[in-house]
Image (cartoon, rainbow, N blue to C red):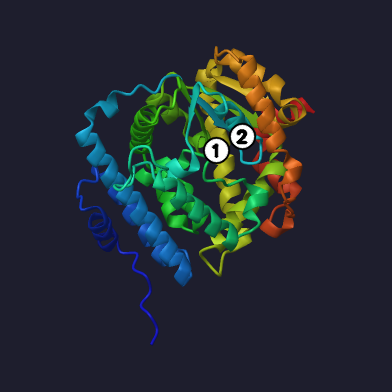
Amino acid sequence: MQEEPMSLEAESILAEARQKTGLDDFGDDSFREPMERLLRSMEEEADLSAAGRAMQRARVVGLLVNRLRAEDHLKRFPEILEEEIREPLVIVGLARTGTTMLHRMIASDPLMFSLLWWESRNPAPFPQSGEGERDPRISDAEAEVAAMIEGAPDLVAMHPIEAGEPDEEIMLLEHSFFSTNPEAFVNVPSFGAWLDEQDQTPGYLYLKKLLQFLQWQKKRAGVSGERWVLKTPHHLGFMDLLFKVFPDARVIQTHRDPLQTIPSFASLIHAIRSLGSDAADPLVAGRQWSDRMSRALRRCMEVRESHEDRFIDVWFADAMQDPLAQMRRIYDFAAMELTPETEARMRQWLVDNAREKRVPHSYTLEQFGFSEEGIRRDFAAYRERFIIPER
């Protein structure tokens, strides 16, 4: 007898989150419409396998569980919302432009707060967490990373996923459902088109709330820090909202020719989508994400016209040739001191994470429906401003 497919119905998922936590306050209702539209798009468009349906239901339930636990903490510890997110340093750029390297090097500075992968997946503590013991969220994240790598071994060559390393706050944004992250996991074009037309301020406000929550947790755990270092390509399309919610943010924008970055990024998206669908189409992944990134870069360039003093530019070739020189530029720009001790930490990070230690990442433009002429056309304005002059 064939089993019924895993339900992606919103009320069933909300009920499961309540049952898992014994809580019922999800916070403000701004998440409900995007969540419902996402689930509908998954049902109608994503062509998920049985494993993919189970994975996506579990992911959405997990996001809602975190919302419930976060709201419970905020009621019990209202001082959380008094935490100040001061002058965050935000790295933006297309994927494959050196953002991860810069992010993790800066995160090695003990004066910087950073979002660890396990924190991004479960920003709210598990109820059974005890003082002085290893946080059970870490073991949970390690198991999830291992399962992802087992399902798609090529992921390691494309992006270093490690439970204990800094990663992207787009996974915090996902808790509001105002996030492009679901589009990386599943083909949900109607959800993506709807999201593009919405005011996504609620997502950035919820991101700030979760950063305050995590900063409060870090301080209670004895982690010292003065500023956050954040990183995600998602912000490229929403720099106006970033500055609205974090008005003193400083931005590092990384640059590399889209001819090198966009096909590589498409291969990452396709690998992730293949975890949950037997019909994942590399041509669809290429088209969707090339369009999304070209629009995001255009929006970023528009915002830069009135915020140019908030940006410092770092070119991929320069970062690869002399990363410490770029760090000195960044620290000068951010009015931060790069101490000899922090520079030594960064040098050690470079030794420990040399690119040659990772498996090579192989792909072709044609796999994802690209041509050099097409990429030059779609990213013409960006290439004219940031790429061609550097040759």
Question: Which quarter of the figure is the C terminus placed in?
Answer: top right
* Residue 243 coordinates in the image, percent (x, y): 43, 24
Q: Is residue 247 left or right of residue 282?
A: left
Q: Earlier in the sequence, mark 1 or mark 2?
A: 2
Tell me the residue at 53%/53% (across/down): 145
Q: Residues within 10 Å of mark 1 (few under 14, many from 20)?
A: many
Taking depth in this image into account, of 143 and 14 the one nearest to the observer is: 143
Q: Which residue is mark 2?
A: 99
226 above or below 371?
A: above
Tell me the residue at 36%/59% (across/down): 39
Label 1 or label 2, whichever lies nearer to me, is 2
Q: Amino acid at mark 1?
A: Pro
Question: Which quarter of the figure is the N terminus placed in?
Answer: bottom left
Tell me the residue at 65%/54% (across/down): 267
**Can residue 41 be spotted in the picture?**
no
181 above or below 380?
A: below
Instruction: Choose top left, top right, bottom left or bottom right for residue 96.
Output: top right
**Can residue 234 be spotted in the picture?**
yes
Q: Amino acid at mark 2?
A: Thr
Taking depth in this image into account, of 339 and 385 the one nearest to the observer is: 339
Name the residue at the right extreme: 391
Instruction: Choose top left, top right, bottom left or bottom right for residue 339.
Output: top right
Q: Which residue is mark 1?
A: 233
Taking depth in this image into account, of 348 and 369 the one nearest to the observer is: 348
105 above or below 62?
A: above
